Image (cartoon, rainbow, N blue to C red):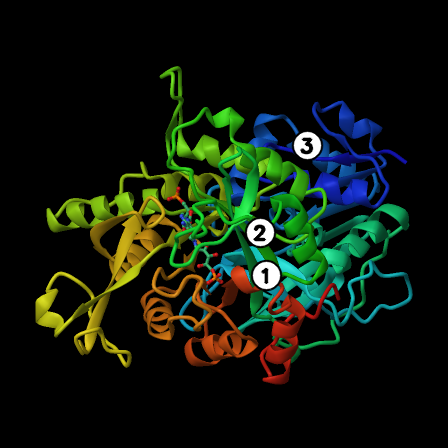
Amino acid sequence: MKLYLLDYGAGNVRSLVNAIERLGHHIEFIQTADDFAKADKIIFPGVGAFGFAVQALRDKGFTECLRAYIASGRPLMGICVGMQVLFDGSDESPSEPGLGIFEGRVRLFDSTSKSVPHIGWNGAQVVHTDNSEPAPSVGADSRYYFVHSYAVPYTGQGQQQSYVHTATRYGDEAIVSSVWRDNVFATQFHPEKSGVAGLELIRSFIENDLIRSPASGCAIADTEVVDALSVRVIACLDVRANDAGDLVVTKGDQYDVRETSGDVRNLGKPVDLAARYFEEGADEVTFLNITSFRDRPFADTPMLEVLRQTSQRVFVPLTIGGGVRDVAEPDGSKVWPAVEVAGEYFRSGADKVSIGSDAVYAAEKYWERKAKGEAPLDGSTAIEQIANRYGRQAVVVSVDPRRVYVAGPEDAPTHHVIKTAAPGPSGEQFCWYQCTVKGGREPRDLDVWQLVTACQAMGAGEILLNCMDRDGTNSGYDLELVADVKAAVNIPVIASSGAGRPEHFSEAVEATKVDAVLAAGIFHRREVPIEAVKRHMDQRGIPVRITNE
Ligand code: 1PR
């Protein structure tokens, strides 16, 4: 059996190849139109924007080949945008028609009452009534990893009755999460990023004959689709070279990563630790290259190799941060635009990039332009360019704030001041959160509210909210900060810095409705296992993905 991957140059396909190899199979890449004739099965991954995918298929001369392949009756599995492109069109790129294999249109989620993009592990409820043939093993109790702002609304009516396989609820909307008719099976979620459950689904496509005649109807009404979105528990690894030149996972106390002896704290090897967290049930793994502000040749960035190796062992989403900006080679030979830097990371196995310092500079310009009455955006920032090319869900903004106490709002008239229940050293009842750059080394005249609202406008898909005051203290998240940022944006927010006990995680979710919770030190030092955090949250009634379900 010859298995092919339809790569059109978008995002992270390495994880898919790694997943297939992990299952003991081999996959070739479709490189020319002639390759379609050789394929017995094709996987059509989709990362990036709908319009980009449609154009890329057209530019490579693949559109008609793909249609002919589907018409030939050979099996196709689409993933994410690879599923969306099979529909008539998408509001994401209204001028680009889809392939029209399935009737329906891809729509933007409504963000009035929920975070958009939809990022996280959610259920997939089988809706069709035809059970006579073997189904791809979409586990009824499993959760899969979704990351998207656009989706096909699920109605269970009309043509949908012939092709919808599973539906998923996200807040007030039910969406089509997988389709299956004749020889075409496709998922809105990413099986290659969905741990063991996802690997089993890919195996079932590769190893079984899944051709199915049209289903005879949908047994589930849109109102009956159950919300199974879980709160993500993320393990974060701060990575840097120690004084001997070895790449290590380190961990700071309020960003200071040196022991009293002066050595860089060494908590393990990046790839091994990431693999351990995958086995222990982490929903995502984040790497932060914390000395990225130092100039070095980009191609030598050791994080590229860390990602390559990690993505062979870790089948949940990987985020990489640190140094995502325009990078000049030290010898002046070349400047890598940020979008190319991000592209290298995606090709090496990252699913998302996280931007710290560069986001602060971009936000400062945004507000300067606004103050002058100019258009605040011109498409030139790294956030805009990466979001346009790879989709906003691929862009995380990492924030490194610290508290500045003031007696009252009048003391910081240009900043977003909040009243705090934890007064300052001189009894100050108010504070604002000051953004910093270069790993907290340089404070800027920008507050967190200004930063996150500007970055959301630029196209950021998620906020990774650290807190310098709480980092490494084990004293709990700064809930006032988290609540304030949740209120400022409608993209997902990850609470970070300060987790010391399982209760800190549940407290953050219950008090702020934050979308994900992240920790570093307590996981590295094995003080609290990820499983204990999830068990505790589950007992509190907070939806979580139980380890490698
Ligand atoms: O500015 O785009 O090059 O990105 C640099 C990245 O490196 C930023 O995301 C920044 O947060 C990170 N960074 C730089 N210096 C440090 C440092 O610690 N000296 N890491 C650093 C700080 C904190 C988290 C930590 C949480 C949870 N990030 O990494 O994981 O605070 O810790 P805890 O659970 O142990 O409390 P750019």
Task: Give the position of the N terminus as an image quadrant.
Answer: top right
Residue 436 at x, y percent in the picture: 29, 51
Q: State the SS at label 3.
A: helix
Alpha carbon separation for disc pair 3 and 2: 52 Å
Residue at coordinates 58% horizontally, 79% vertically from top-left?
A: 542
- The answer to which of marks 3 and 2 sits earlier in the sequence is 3
Question: Which residue type does callout 2 highlight?
Answer: Leu
Residue 304 at x, y percent in the picture: 57, 34
Residue 292 figure quarter: top left
Q: Can you tell which of label 3 and label 2 is closer to the viewer?
A: 2
Residue placed most toward the observer, 110 or 5:
5
Q: Is residue 54 visible?
A: no
Q: State the SS at label 2.
A: loop
Is there a contact, CB below 8 Å, between mark 2 and mark 1?
Answer: yes
Question: Which residue type does callout 3 highlight?
Answer: Glu
Q: Is residue 288 left or right of residue 434?
A: right
Residue at coordinates 60% horizontally, 47% vertically from top-left?
A: 81
Alpha carbon separation for disc pair 2 and 1: 8 Å
The residue at the far front in this view is 261
Question: Which residue type does callout 1 highlight?
Answer: Arg
- Disc assigned to residue 64: 3
Q: Is residue 455 left or right of residue 62?
A: left
Is there a contact, CB below 8 Å, between mark 3 and mark 1?
Answer: no
Residue 110 at x, y percent in the picture: 45, 66
Q: Which residue is mark 2?
A: 267
